[in-house]
Amino acid sequence: MDIETFDLLRGTVRRFVDERLIPAEDRVEHDDAVPAEIIKEMGQLGLFGLSVPEEHGGLGLTMAEEAAIIRELTRASVVFRSVIGTTVGIGSQGIVMDGTPEQKQEWLPRLAAGEAVASFALTEPEAGSDAASLRTTAVREGNYYRVNGTKRFITNAPRASMFTLMARTEADVKGSGGISAFIVPADTPGISLGKPDKKMGQKGAMTCDVIFDDVLVPAANIIGGVPGRGFKTAMKVLDRGRIHIAAVALGMCDRLVDMSLRYAMERKQFGQRIADFQLVQALLADSKVDTLTTEALMCSVATRFDAGEKVSLEASALKYFSTEAVGRVADRAVQIHGGAGYMAEYKVERFYRDVRLLRIYEGTSQIQQLIIAREMLRGAEA
Ligand code: COS
């Protein structure tokens, strides 16, 4: 995208955040839902199609550009981002990266237009961090696979049109080699949803179990057409997803630093504004450093991703640092707000709970540490 068009898009998103999303945050929290008219407006802005290539009807942004837009968007409650998150990220990218031309043609234009919502179904009750141990089975029967199993904590499952589903097609192959990725339309008979999950935060972001009970999926729906490659597709999708999550962390850092600074400049104690106390300044400064460090790392990793480098280690480092950083920034924001920080009307306690999830989903901080160290060892041993 040329720089002028991109700046226009970013400016439009910034206005949308200030004029539409931030004023709607309390309503989302109260209703536990993002209003339908806001979802519609997000579609009109093209937000569902950020990462879909232009030839398939999307905006075809680079990773660096997508991160900049997501950073802008997540100055508002991260719940709004969750509406588009799985369609822009983990739900669609398996098709973008590894799909056949027919699969791309069938799904990507609808996903980009916001007419269809994609959801990513990897996690199971017994397979979280150890994704390769998943138990959902897909047994070949002629031109179909019969799928049975339960997927857990699946974001956007209630509004999904399709699932990128990871299931075991080779029963005798243990671990990652026996896993295939499927495109499964959400209205396929045999799919049912569990009750909505009650969460610590992110009210309005929808997650629930997805149960597959004798679901017949055409063999032609295996992503890329070749069984046994689903785990690698999922890992590649997650490498990219982790950069996207870091952009979410960065957007929330911006918001929380801004809220902290404003409050510190308004609030008076001991006859002066608390921003003039050095201990409060230390909190503000540390949060700014966390934000700037995340920004710099983001810039480097996204640029290398866009240049076609394999950035598993760097994406994990970025996800790890940025999500831990926003946790610290949120904690300091509550501290700067004092008693008010603990009260719902000031919103920082909500954001503190909301960002807690960033250190868990798309790979916990501990999984990121493990990936970083493993890649370091591999590099040293090679
Ligand atoms: N890109 C491409 N291929 C990758 C890859 C990546 N980032 N990571 C692993 N692979 C490949 C490996 O090369 C290996 O292929 P070969 O068998 O041909 O050598 C295969 O996938 C299996 O990899 P590995 O042996 O590393 O698998 P593990 O079971 O040890 O998986 C981790 C390790 C922990 C990295 C993986 O399970 C993981 O990321 N877990 C977290 C899952 C997660 O983020 N869940 C969140 C749910 S989605 S919101």
Image (cartoon, rainbow, N blue to C red):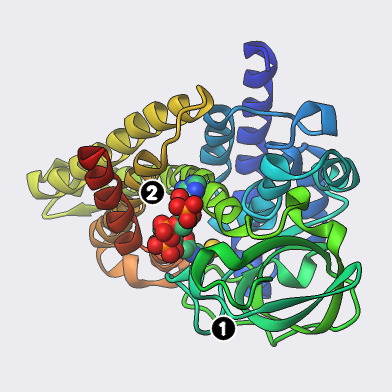
Residue at label 2? 319
Depth check, front residue: 129 or 52: 129
| Residue 358 rendering spot, x and y as whole percentages | 43, 59
CA neighbours of label 1 inside 10 A, class few (<14), some (14 to 19), many (20+): few
| Image x and y of residue 203, in percent | 58, 71
Residue 345: give its label: none
Which residue does the numbered mark 1 point to in the structure image?
198
The residue sitting at the front extreme is 172
Q: Is residue 77 visible?
A: no
Given residues 15 and 263, the one toward you in this image is 15
Pick whichever, 227 or 304, lies toward us: 227
Mark 2 lies on a secondary structure that is helix
Q: Is mark 1 within 8 Å of ligand 1?
A: no
Which three-letter amino acid code belongs to the residue tagged 2? Lys
Q: Please determine whether, in this image, residue 124 is positioned above or below residue 18.
A: below
194 lies above or below 321: below
Vertical side of 231 occupied by 248: above or below: above
Point 84% across, 63% down: residue? 219
Three-letter amino acid code of the residue under disc 1: Lys
Using the numbered discs, state the Cα–Cα distance from disc 1 to disc 2 in whole angstroms.
25 Å
Secondary structure found at label 1: loop
